[in-house]
Image (cartoon, rainbow, N blue to C red):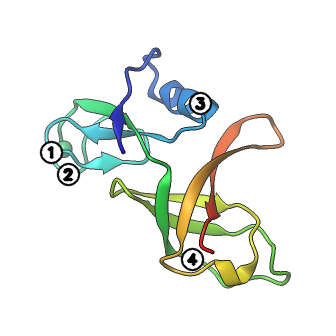
Amino acid sequence: MTSTVTPTATDPAEVYRDGLAHGELRYQRCAWCSTRFSSVSLLCATCGGADFVWERSSGRGRIHALPGPLGPGDRQERTAVVELDEGFRVLAKLAPTAAHRIWRGAPVRLEVAETDDGSLRPVFRPIAA
Ligand SMILES: [Zn+2]
């Protein structure tokens, strides 16, 4: 379920990073038209509104698209467009997963991974049996 976040920071990028540090994906919802955005916006692309509410995603969604072909080796890291249950899409890495568990429509769950430079990024793990 979604819930509203009361940010402790004013910098949207920091609010987003704070979310990852808590293991959650935060996103902005336009206060005027309720369009949800996965990336930080100053103006709503739908209605031009400038008021946003922060919410946290359930972290559950489905693979919407898989850009590019599967490479050699079936546990290679892949990128996917994931549609979250809240109705917005993000482009993110998939956690290393056997290729037969990755398909369009496969359910996925958010995990937070640390990159080589120590920053955090969202990754999605297919959870189909
Ligand atoms: Zn709007």
> x%, y% of residue 85?
38, 57
Disc 3: which residue: 22
Q: CA distance from mark 2 to mark 3?
A: 29 Å
State left or right for residue 53 relative to residue 113: left
- Name the N-terminal-most of marks 3 and 1: 3
Disc 1: which residue: 33
Q: CA distance from mark 4 to mark 2?
A: 26 Å
State the mark number for residue 46. Answer: 2
> Within 10 angstroms of label 1, few (less than 14), some, or many (20 or more) residues?
some
State the mark number for residue 66. Answer: 4
- Name the N-terminal-most of marks 1 and 2: 1
Ligand 1 is within 8 Å of the C-beta of the residue at disc 2:
yes
Residue drawn where x is 24% and y is 43% of the image: 44
Judged from the image, the secondary structure of the residue bearing numbered disc 1 is loop
Ligand 1 is within 8 Å of the C-beta of the residue at disc 4:
no
Q: CA distance from mark 3 to mark 1?
A: 28 Å
- Name the N-terminal-most of marks 1 and 4: 1
> x%, y% of residue 74?
81, 80
Q: CA distance from mark 1 to mark 2?
A: 8 Å
| Amino acid type at image mark 1 | Cys
- Name the N-terminal-most of marks 4 and 2: 2
